[in-house]
Amino acid sequence: MTTLGDFMVTRGGSLNPSSFPNEEFELYSIPAHDRGGPDFTLGSDIGSSKQIVEPGDVMVSKIIPHIRRARVVGPHKGRRQIASGEWIVFRGHSFHSNYLRQFLISDGFHKQFMNTVAGLGGSLVRARPAQVKSIPLPLPPLPEQRRIAAILEHADALRAKRRQVLTHLDALTQSIFHDMFGDVRTNQHGYDVATIADISERVTDGEHKTPRRSESGFPLISARNVRDGWIDFENTDFVDADEYALLSRRIEPRQGDVLISCSGSIGRVAQVGERNRFAMVRSAALVRPGPTVHPTFLERTLASPTLKSIMVAHANSSAQANLFQNQIKRLPVLVPPLALQEEFADRVARIGAVVDAAKTTTAADDELFASLQSRAFRGEL
């Protein structure tokens, strides 16, 4: 056993990429990681100083720590490698990089990691490196680390293939949508065209003031919880009953409403299901369909590549992109006959049954993988 502090990089050096405007860097940022990055970006397009990293370094995100983000810096490909300050970096010759990465996403580490956090809530919560240093790390000999890492990486790859099934099913739904309704720009079927404001009962966003968080209660949804086609209730902040009552005066989401992520990552869309009671902050918007629009049709309309590209193009950019209510209200949409929308919703529901089965299998995979990780870091594999 050792501790993570033995490998934590505290003085690895930094540079300001803007001093090298024409140089292309290999940038490891949190958004790039979420997109499967890194990004390859000119120094002129990088706004602040970054830490210097090396091939084989292992990083864990200290921002929004309940989302498990860990990655290995890839082989050198001719560009200088840099990372945002939101990463805690580990470097050394006595650990295998993929072994450490697997440890940093394991349940055992995550529980200890969350005990190091501080902040007011949401994106302001960060893990404190000084406390992360003391987290113990089981460190068998390198050949054993490689063996354990190979087992876990293989199991992780199988989980990823299961998740790809969900991606393919979503693509099928979008393909059916395009076949039935076409595109609002070309309108090849000649449907009526309206705006979101025309066909909606309500368009709004969440609370603009910072809500008072609590340890439990009602979920508080922000842009990061609005995923493509679903709402992530596993990684939310909470508000108590009194704060929920205050926030509900602005809007109380109900079944059939459609949410849009409108700050930071623009244009993710999800429909509110039954029995989902929650509050919202400004970074999530809500569209409540009127009587001429089926909620499932509206959801898939807003999720279409055309509407998403329009939303991204219209988002205001300052420190981060933002999409505002008036911009959402002006979005153009097709209005086909309601009977055709209902036929589409029925086909989506049948695909949804397959999706639910795939999600059940994926959840079982996740449980088995967590058990495998636990055994691995107890020396039981």
Image (cartoon, rainbow, N blue to C red):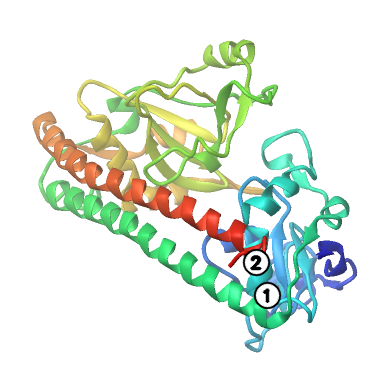
Q: Position of residue 185 (x, y in %)?
A: 25, 51
Q: Is residue 332 visible?
A: yes
- Dot 2 crowding, Cα within 10 Å, few <14, some 14–19, many 20+: many
Camera-nearest residue between 177 and 216:
216
- Quarter where residue 260 is shown: top left
Q: Is residue 73 visible?
A: no
Is residue 367 found left or right of 140 in the rendered image? left
In which quadrant of the rendered image does the C terminus lie? Answer: bottom right
Q: Residue at x 27, y 22 (%)?
A: 290
Q: Residue at x 80, y 45 (%)?
A: 116
Q: Position of residue 367 (x, y in %)?
A: 48, 50
Task: Please say if 381 is above or below 268.
Answer: below
Report the residue marked by disc 2: 101
In which quadrant of the rendered image does the N terminus lie? Answer: bottom right
Q: Residue at x 33, y 32 (%)?
A: 196
Cβ atoms under marks 2 and 1 closer than 8 Å: yes
- Quarter where residue 43 is shown: bottom right
Q: Amino acid at mark 1?
A: Ser
Q: Position of residue 271 (x, y in %)?
A: 36, 34
Q: Position of residue 215 (x, y in %)?
A: 68, 26
Report the residue marked by disc 1: 97
Element type at mark 2: helix
Is residue 315 found left or right of 134 in the rendered image? left
